[in-house]
Every structure is written in structure tokens, then in C-alpha cells.
Image: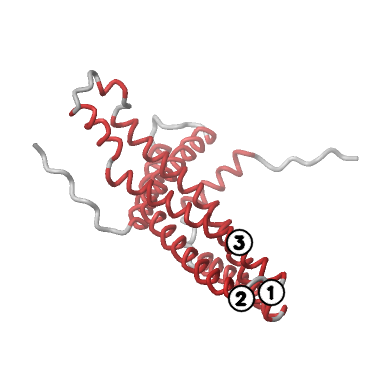
Amino acid sequence: MSEPAPADPRPASEQARDAARAAARDAARQAARPDGPATPAQRLEAEAKAALRADAILVERITPWLFEVGTWVFGGLIAFNILLISALVTVGPVGTAVRVSITAFACGLPLTVAGMCVLRLVKDMKEVGLDDLTLQAFKDAGYPDAESYFPDPRERKAQQGKRSVVALWYTLGIALAGIVLTVTGLVAALWYMAWWIGVVALAVALASVGLVAAVFMQTQPRQPPAENEAKRRLRDAQGPPRRGPDR
């Protein structure tokens, strides 16, 4: 019996980047083969399919990292909401700004807890192998023809991948809602001290988001010549832009 292949020790981001490059190289080789796509439209279609495969591989490779990032984001939001709620409860409803702040934190806390639960449950179900354990439990219990009631291993793996992607999309929306409510509660609490403090805090928060976006935009790698050539072929295949009818 052959031994299983050792796990790749590299980070998930590097594995995903190499997988995307490999998919792009495969598309380039297919386009360059004599028996490959002949027309520019066919070559572009082949490259588009390869890009979709590369995106799927990228999402699959970085899913564990995204789950880890989501976990500590939700953990930070939960801790912050609990801390501010406990401080504002002692103050009491002394003003409209305080009531708005407490309401925002009280609404954001259950959302962030729900997001944390979704991430942890989906991740643990995949790591434990709940689907395989369920099938094995039915087999051990002597259930007749148990495998016919469960999908095959390939389909179970596809279901796990779909479950992870759906969980990430839902938790992304939950995280955005939780962040908006947390920022609203913080600004309202600072507004109670002085209105300009809340305005300054909101401006600094927006500037911080812009700074993070600028850092990622500046650190993006340059487009390789092959990608520029593919874009040029796409423009040539589409032809010149059509002009509207003369009036």
C-alpha cells in the first residue's frame, strides 16, 4: 500500500499563487498547440475556462486561511462589543447618543456571535469529517445498503467545498453588518462626549480603511507580458468600439 503524499509546508497563499500560475501556463500551452484552439475567439474561450479553474483552485487553497482570519475578526468584534456594552450599561440612558450606542452594540453582538458559530462549525465539520463519520456509523450499525443513501466520495468533497464557500459568503455579510454596527455604536458613544469627537473618530476610521486599501494596491505585482498580450488579443477580437447613430 503506497504511503500518502506529504502535505505541502508552504503557506496557503503561496500554494494558491502557484496553482493560478500553473493554470495560466496550461492555458498558454493549449493555445500554442497545433491541435488547440485555432481562432482568437476559441483561444480566448480556452483561456477564460483556465482562469475560472484557477479561481476555483485559489478559493479552495485559501479557504483555511480565510476561516482563520474570520475567526479572529469576529472574536475581536465580540470582545469589543461586550466591553462597551458593560461600560454603557453603568452610564444608563442619559441621552439619545448613549441609547443609539447601546442599541447598535446590542444588535451587533448576536450577529458577530452567529458569524463565529458558522465559521467554527463549518471548519470543524470538515476537519472531523462528519459526513464520513455518519456513513461509517450507519455501516457499523448494520444498516442495509447504507452507501446508497449517501453521495459518493467525490460528490461529498464537492459538497464540503460548496459548504465552505457558502459559509464564507454569509459570514462576510455578517462581518460587514457587525463592523457597521460596531462603528456606529462607537461614534455615538463618542458623540455623547462631544459631537466633534465622533466626527473625528469616523473620519479616522474611513482614512484607516483607505490606507489599508492603498497598501494592498501598491503591493500588487505587475501584470505579466502574457496577460497584457491576452488582453490585447481580446480587444483585437472584439474590434473597434461601435459609435452611436448620428443625429
Place of residue 105 in the rendered image (x, y in percent of width and height, measured from the top left): 58, 64
Amino acid carrying label 2: it is: Val
Whether the residues at callouts 1 and 2 have beta carbons within 8 Å, the answer is yes
Whether the residues at callouts 3 and 2 have beta carbons within 8 Å, the answer is no
Answer with mark 1 or mark 3, whichever residue precedes in sequence. 1
Which residue has dot 3 on it?
180
Is disc 1 surrounded by few (<14), some (14 to 19) or many (20+) residues within 10 Å? Answer: few
Q: Secondary structure at mark 1?
A: loop
The residue drawn where x is 22% and y is 18% is 144
Place of residue 131 in the rendered image (x, y in percent of width and height, measured from the top left): 30, 35
Question: In terms of image quadrants, where is residue 205?
Answer: bottom right
Separation (CA) of disc 1 from disc 2: 7 Å
For the N terminus, the quadrant is top left
- In front of the other: 79 or 169: 79
Q: Secondary structure at mark 3?
A: helix
Q: Nearer the viewer, mark 3 or mark 2?
A: 2
- In front of the other: 54 or 3: 3
Give the numbered dot on residue 91.
2
Answer with mark 3 or mark 2, whichever residue precedes in sequence. 2
Amino acid carrying label 3: it is: Val
